Image (cartoon, rainbow, N blue to C red):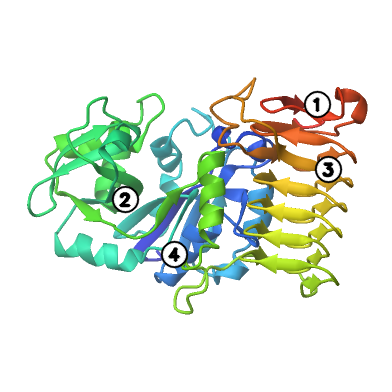
Amino acid sequence: MVKKEMIAMLLAGGQGSRLGVLTTRMAKPAVPFGGKYRIIDFPLSNCINSGIDTVGVLTQYQPLRLNTHIGIGIPWDLDRNIGGVTVLPPFERNINTDWYTGTANAIYQNIEYMESYNPDYVLILSGDHIYKMDYEVMLDYHKANDAAVTIAAMPVPLEEAKRFGIVITDDDNRITEFEEKPEEPHGNLASMGIYIFNWKVLREALIANADQPNLDFGKHVIPYCHEKDLRLFAYEYNSYWKDVGTLSSYWEANMELIDIIPEFNLYEEYWKIYTKCETLPPQFLGEGSFVEGSIIGEGCEIFGHVEHSVIGCDVYIGPGTIVKDSIIMNASRIGRDCDITKAIIAENVVVGDDVKMGTGDEVPNETEPSIYTNALVTIAEHSSIPSGISIGKNTVVSGSLKKEDLENRMLPSGRSFIKAGEVS
């Protein structure tokens, strides 16, 4: 039997519904980030930079783009004869066939995969956070405390604590209490959804709780281990960590990459972020173009003015166009004389000439006010925007927008245009 000291299980099956139309056709971990990356690149890169060469990636919702991106793991040096990266979708069994119904249920359904490596430790990760962490240091901490379970945790503002699993610890960082999304939290040390388990402890906890509906780490597995009086410790993390689960936090995390001194630095030589790259020519800045404080991906042709924005690969921006505080993803085409402010434009979007985005007053969105907020304009992939129209704030467009769909060539602030049948 193959023996690995620690393997990683990366949960990447989430829909990410709070990202709205960005995740209509792909799982949240596959969403582009930072010009050339996808969100899953960050935990995968953390694994290989931490010396972990065996990673199971658990997929479920809209997995095609994610599976294609991961492939056999070449960009992350995870194309191994023994170990490497393995995509683990739900599969049909003789009995009890089911979709993954919870974070821990997904791990439980892959016990055989984990057993095949006979690990001493199993690292559980989420596929939708932006951060850099050396899991080897966390493992050393786990061993030094003779822990059964170690939970990575970070301080959060007390008013936000109810959104997280909260750990209460003693002076030695041993966990004395665990509260999953408490209404009135007794502390502010929040679980990051990153766990190291002794393999035998994890296996027993999963089997013992297998019948729980929607088997979850925070609701079932961690409380079970705590009730058994096992040694649970908190590993406090105080560096950059961002949950990009909402459009606002996704936009903010991208904008933070281009601060004068970014808190999250993509350019550190000793901790590279790896990704699958297309073969594209270099960027081209045409006559009259102007770029300031922005990330510009490979293969871009810029003839306009780009300021404080993140531009993906193979993007075209026409003459006279001004792009500010925006994210434009791969292979999108922006015409001439446009004015685009605070927009998130997904992949393969075509924008005509003389289009204005982010105009007018801020009005709550009519269909999803909690998703399309923060004065953003959100355009779904493969959408098209005709020339000569204006789009207000807190708006969303999905599909082929036509002039005849609008009054006065205007999509007012707070409006949603989602064409049935074009984006499923």
Check if mark 4's residue and mark 2's residue have beta carbons within 8 Å. no
Mark 3 or mark 4: which comes first in sequence? 4
Residue 243 position within the rendered picture, expressed as x and y whole percent measured from the top left: 45, 46
Left or right of 94, for residue 304: right
Exactly how many numbered labels are in the figure?
4
Q: At 57% across and 33% down in the image, what residue appears? A: 373
Residue extending farthest to the top is 366
Q: Residues within 10 Å of mark 1 (few under 14, many from 20)?
A: some
Percent coordinates x, y for residue 163 in the rendering: 35, 33
Q: In this rendering, does residue 5 appear at all?
A: no
Mark 4–mark 1 Cα distance, whole angstroms, equals 40 Å
Local secondary structure at mark 1: loop
Q: Circle 4 sits on which residue?
A: 47
Label 4 near label 3: C-beta < 8 Å? no
- Disc assigned to residue 355: 3
The amino acid pointed to by label 4 is Cys
Check disc 4: other Cα within 10 Å, few if <14, some if 14-19, many if 20+: many
Disc nearest the viewer among 4 and 1: 1
Image quarter of the N terminus? bottom left
Q: Which structural element holds mark 4? A: helix
Q: Residue at x 68, y 46 (%)?
A: 341
Q: Is residue 301 visible?
A: yes
First in sequence, mark 1 or 2: give its number. Answer: 2
Q: Nearer the observer, disc 2 or disc 3? A: 3
Q: To which quarter of the image does residue 247 belong?
A: top right
* Residue 408 at x, y percent in the picture: 87, 25
The residues bearing labels 1 and 2 have C-alpha atoms spaced at a distance of 42 Å
Q: Which mark is residue 195?
A: 2
Closer-to-camera residue (350/148) = 350
User: Dot 1 corresponds to which residue?
Assistant: 419
